[in-house]
Structures are given as structure tokens and as C-alpha cells.
Image: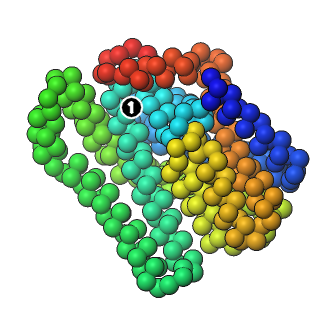
Amino acid sequence: MTARLITVLLVVAMLAFSYWYSPRVWISITACFIPALLIAFAHGERINILTGRKLGMLYATKGNSLALVGAFFVPGRLTEILKPLYYHRTRQLPISAGVSVVVVERIFDIIAVIGIAFIALNFVDLPSKALSASMTSLTIMLSLCLMVVIYIALRFPAFIEKTIARLPFESLRQFTESSFRAFREGLAHGVRYWSIVLTMLVWAGSVGLYWLFLQFDGGAVLELDQILVVFLVATLGITITLTPGGLGTFEAAVTLILQHYGYPFEAALASAIGLRLVAFFPNALIAGYVVLFEGFDFVKARKQAEALGDDREPV
């Protein structure tokens, strides 16, 4: 309870600071609200496709928003489990299938971020050519590793199934087998045309949101390559963290990179908070609807996640 209260107070303080110091940031937030909402629905439709359209776009979107908002109250990305729980409760999707969809989704997200990073590396002036070559090689290597994982899962399932069959407990084997089957189905859906298009739209749209926001926030004028770098730094700041929702690490990372590009400290901090709110508000609106009108209980869901044993457990 104390951690949640502190989180809420920090969010309120962020709102007050950004409004008091830089009202123009709120012009940017307002300009980005509708595009951010559309991206949230596009993200939901992508999840829906990965499940073989078993969820429906609205339910997929609501589950994703629950996970994103819940991340502000639980460290790391543990609230990703809220998606499978919500989908099981509302659409009777097996927990194993929901977990597998989350994994598939992250694989394609990582590929998308690597692609954006690869593009950015061609624009950013790094200190040395050796460092540039090393970063490019690392990006290519990560991409190839993910492609190999996808290829093996799709073309050589028997090898993995034999490995699963050696697991010690029957319940674990059953859960892992059903998860792997769902994982393969999700991968198969993920490499199809519309899934790839939606993944590109979601990530290109996210970069576009940063571009739109930074046009009106009153800070320095940034070029597209600089905005790409800001986006990548922000993505790392919210991903590589132990704090709920990357609270603090995201703001620090974005503030530092904006200062590097000419923003005064106070303006950089206000814009970092504003960029956080651009992603938060639309998802909070959707998650709030689920909590208030559908009766979804975060506390109960968290307890169920901790006690999760198999895909037949009721939610």
C-alpha cells in the first residue's frame, strides 16, 4: 500500500510540475492524445491477430492497457501476466496461450526496436568508426539470433517437443507443451502480412508521437535522427529498470538526452514527464473503464498470478 501511495504521489507531483513550469507541454500532450489512443487500438489488433483473432480487438486492447497501467504499481514487466489473466477471464483463452502470445509479441517488438536502432545508427555520429561498426554488428547479430529462434520453432518443433517431454513434472510438461503449441501458432500468425504491417505501424506511430510531441513542447528544434535517438533512449529507460513502470529511469534518461540536444534542464524534465503522460493517459482511460465497469481487480489478479499453476485455474 505504501509503495502504491508513493507512486500516486509521484505521478501527481509530475503533473503539477509539468503544468506549472511548462504549459506548452500540455499542448503537446493534447495534440498526441488521439493518435496515442489509435496506436493503443492498433496494438490491441496486433495482439488479436497473434491469438488467431480469438479475442477481438477491444478485449485485446483492454488487456494490454491493464498491463501497461499496472506496470506503474509493480516493478519491472511482471504485470504482463495481467493480459493472460484478463483474456482467460473474459474470452476463455487458456493461460498458456496468453503467456505465449506475450512472448511472441515481445519477440517481434525486439525485432522492431532493433530495426529502428539500425536506422538510427546510420544517422548518429558516434565517437569512432570502430564503435559504430561494433554497434552495427551487435544489432545484426541480435536480429539473426531472433530469426534463428523463429525458424527453429516453426520448422523443427519435434526437437523442442522431445526436450519438453523430459521435464520432471506432469503438470509442468502439460503447461509447457500447450504453451509451446500456442507459441508456434502465435509465431505463424506473427509472420503474416497484417501482423507485420501492424507491428511496423505501432512502432512507426510511436516514433511519430515523439516527433509530434517535440514539435509543440517549447524546447529545442530537433531533427528526425535526433528524435529517433530520444525514442530509443526512452525505450531503454522504460525497459531496463527495476522501478514500477520505469518511473524515474525513463525521466532521467529522456531528460539527459534532451539536455544533450540543447534543452534547458527544467524544460527537458517537463518534456520527459509529458512524454510519459502521452503513453499513460490513453491506456489509463481504457484500464479505468475495465476496472470501474467490468470489475477487474488488480489485487486479486496479482494474487492469482502468484499462485498460477496451470491454464485451467479460474480467474
Given residues 82 and 186, the one toward you in this image is 82
* Label 1 crowd (10 A; few <14 / some 14-19 / many >=20): many
Q: Quadrant of residue 287?
A: top right
Looking at the image, residue 141 lies above or below residue 3:
below
Q: The residue under label 1 is which amino acid type?
A: Gly
x and y percentages locating residue 128 in the rendered image: 50, 84
Q: Which residue is mark 1?
A: 98
Q: Residue at x 58, y 39 (%)?
A: 244
Looking at the image, residue 217 lies above or below residue 40:
below
The quarter in which the N terminus is drawn is: top right
Identify the secondary structure beneath mark 1: helix
244 displayed left or right of 304: right
33 displayed left or right of 152: right
Q: How many marks?
A: 1
x and y percentages locating residue 296 in the rendered image: 56, 19
x and y percentages locating residue 265 in the rendered image: 78, 62
Q: How is the image coloured?
A: rainbow
